[in-house]
Amino acid sequence: MNKTGKAIGLALALSTAFAGMAMAQPTEIRIGVALEPPTLDPTAGAAEAIDIVVYQNVFEGLTRIDETGSVQPGLAESWTISEDGLTYTFKLHDGVTFHDGSAFDAEDVKFTFDRILAADTTNAHPEFYKPITAVTVIDPLTVEFTLDQKIGRFLFDLGRGDAVIVAPESADNNATQPIGTGPFAFTQWDKGSRVILDAYGPYWGEPAHLTKATYVFISDPATMTNALLASDIDGTNNFATDALAVFEGNPQFKVLVGTTEGETILSTNNKKPPFDNLKVRQAMAHALDRQAIIEGTTNGYGTPIGAPFAPHNPYYVDLTATYPHDVAAAKALLAEAGLPDGFSATLKLPPVAYARTSGQIIASQFAEVGIKLELINVEWAQWLEDVYTNKDFDLTIVSHVEPFDIGNYANPDYYFGYDNPEFQALIDKLNGTTDEAARKELAIEAQTILAKDAVNGYLFELAQTGVWNAKLEGMWQNSPIEGLVLRDIHWVE
């Protein structure tokens, strides 16, 4: 071959190589999220922002919840349940390691649940696991749970972010240096900016398609819009509904509209006058125009609710007609409560658009019946301290995103302070029932009690409105549990 032929051959080879490089599928993703997590340990905080980053990505439980809300095997490959429903025996996967290289075994499971149940626990929801009386290591790959009562949703509870398995060697540092068993390992956290996860090479299960995921914190919807349009990020799992029109019909993007477990409520301090008066709470319920709130806050994407249950849940019952919007009825009830001229109250609003917009609309609606609201904007840290922990509030607006969290209403020490022994007994019965038909009947009864007692102002169910690069697949359309699971996300041509 002459020099010209060699040159042409080399040029063709280089052209083919560069074309192959250009066509190679990307393996990294940058995801915009509105809220930065306060910690990266899901066993030590209630904020959804924690699970968005680490649930099923960095940390795993004995079971896991899939996109349909069903329970799947996690670190436990199988389990058996005794006839009386009080003993669960789990067979663990072999060859699992934590991201620091240490081996996972039954002792880690025991440590995790002993920690959850300890008197000084920092777990957000230890009540889910209080019926556990013993966690016994049978052998390194077998662990037994003994309960003092049947829990119909026990396997589901084991799949929550609250129950991910941690190791005694690293548990104390998980807030800032999380070490789990998941398909992604924590790499770095640039406070105020981003968290980076890298695929964990020795992962015990099917490896992820992605090699890296970067969570970028962008609280402002306009900034999020610009970042998407400029390809600075590849998607976001829950985008501001008032800006979705920018992306609908744009072939560069796909908009995924699904359901969440986010019951948005006007949380009420039931122990504080005048909210300890049922007639006052009924009056507030009549004063609420849910459809106006939904249109003004979510551009019509929310679903009205009359109780704290997601409409997609098989146990859901529509109770929105319990207290229909009726200004005259609200005024009459206030008069019966001895407040014919209404009253004044404060409404503390966390830094999310749905809360602050809903707050303005509700303040206007309440003014029609004589209830004058002072709107107080607070940051999340202040909200968690003042409202959630210290119960220093009159009213607030927040979305409760934990699945099947109706049991919170059976806890009189929970932040909205509802104390009803009849309801508490009903939830105990529900928790001990495993028959699905019976559970549904009890769940409907529980929802009905809460609706009639107007414990909180039940507003709407948040929609999940994701905006993603059109070449991405594998994102969850629905969100039956807190999290943004990376497991199946991948790029396509």
Image (cartoon, grey):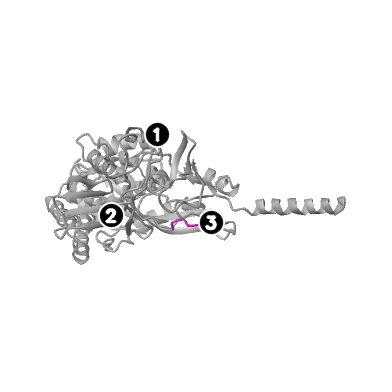
Instruction: Tell me the amino acid under the disc marked 3.
Output: Ala
Q: Which residue is mark 2?
A: 156
Is residue 404 in view? no
- Answer with left or right where residue 445 lies relative to residue 247: left
Neighbour tally class for label 2: few under 14, some 14-19, many 20 plus, Cα within 10 Å: some
* Residue at the extreme front: 1
Q: Secondary structure at mark 2?
A: helix
Q: First in sequence: mark 3 or mark 1?
A: 1
Q: Residue at x 40, y 37 (%)?
A: 100
Dividing the picture into quarters, in which one does residue 294 lie? bottom left
Q: Nearer the viewer, residue 271 or 46?
A: 46
Q: Are marks 3 and 2 in contact (CB under 8 Å)?
A: no
Q: Main secondary structure of the magenta part?
A: loop
Q: Are marks 3 and 1 in contact (CB under 8 Å)?
A: no
Name the spot of residue 408 as percent of width and height, x first.
Answer: 23, 48
Q: Spatial distance from mark 3 to mark 2, Cα to Cα? A: 36 Å
Q: Range of the magenta residues?
A: 472-476
Dividing the picture into quarters, in which one does residue 34 lie? top left
Q: Spatial distance from mark 3 to mark 1, Cα to Cα? A: 37 Å
Q: Which residue is mark 1?
A: 176
- Answer with left or right where residue 164 lies relative to residue 133: right
Neighbour tally class for label 1: few under 14, some 14-19, many 20 plus, Cα within 10 Å: some
Q: Nearer the viewer, mark 3 or mark 2?
A: 2
Name the spot of residue 478 as percent of width and height, x first.
Answer: 40, 58
Residue 102, compared with residue 304, is above or below; it is above
Name the spot of residue 345 as percent of width and height, x first.
Answer: 28, 40
Q: Quadrant of the N terminus?
A: bottom right
Q: Nearer the viewer, residue 268 or 182?
A: 182
Q: First in sequence: mark 2 or mark 1?
A: 2
Q: Secondary structure at mark 3?
A: helix
Q: Which residue is mark 3?
A: 245
Q: Residue at x 21, y 49 (%)?
A: 144
